[in-house]
Image (cartoon, helix red, strand yellow):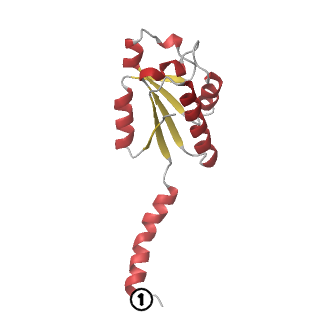
Amino acid sequence: MITNKMLIVLLALMPVYTLAQTGTYKVIFDITSGDTAAYKTVIRQVRGISQSRPDAQLEVAIYGDALPMVMKDKSNIADAIQELSSNKKASFKVCNATMKRNNIDKSQLLPGVDVVPDAIFEIVTKQQEGWGYIKVAH
């Protein structure tokens, strides 16, 4: 038999449970590796989440040695990036500071890739907004 106290606790927790179940699923992926296997890993992870949670907001922050991942002449996952970004399944954000250090301009990037001033600031901002965080490593 449920006591009054237990019933009150259950009723108080129901809105929290409901919010947890209906909240927007938001994840930012952090990739700095120049390893092309890591590029494939992040695509696999993004696809997996977007298939299980079609409403998910997914973003990949690219900086450091991962810059070739989003470059027209160097990416081994160009088709996947274009597919995911054009279908609005994920956004791909490359660090402008990394681009400057490597003398890369926007014309060298794949279509669908956006530039942010600083990838670390982008990641911290998303975390402050409640986004989940995944460091991509292979």
Percent from the top left, x then y, of residue 95? Answer: 41, 22
In the rendered image, which quarter is residue 102 located in?
top left
In depth, the one of 115 and 103 nearer the eye is 103
In the rendered image, which quarter is residue 129 located in?
top left
Q: Amino acid at mark 1?
A: Thr
Q: Please tell me which residue is depicted at 41% across the width and 22% down the height of the picture.
A: 64
Percent from the top left, x then y, of residue 75? Answer: 58, 19
Percent from the top left, x then y, of residue 101? Answer: 37, 13
Q: Please tell me which residue is depicted at 53% across the width and 22% down the height of the picture.
A: 69
Q: Please tell me which residue is depicted at 64% across the width and 29% down the height of the picture.
A: 83
| Crowding near the residue tagged with mark 1, few <14, some 14–19, many ≥20 C-alpha atoms within 10 Å | few
In depth, the one of 55 and 76 nearer the eye is 76
Percent from the top left, x then y, of residue 38? Answer: 54, 30
In depth, the one of 136 and 61 nearer the eye is 136
Q: Secondary structure at mark 1?
A: loop
Residue, disc 1 = 3
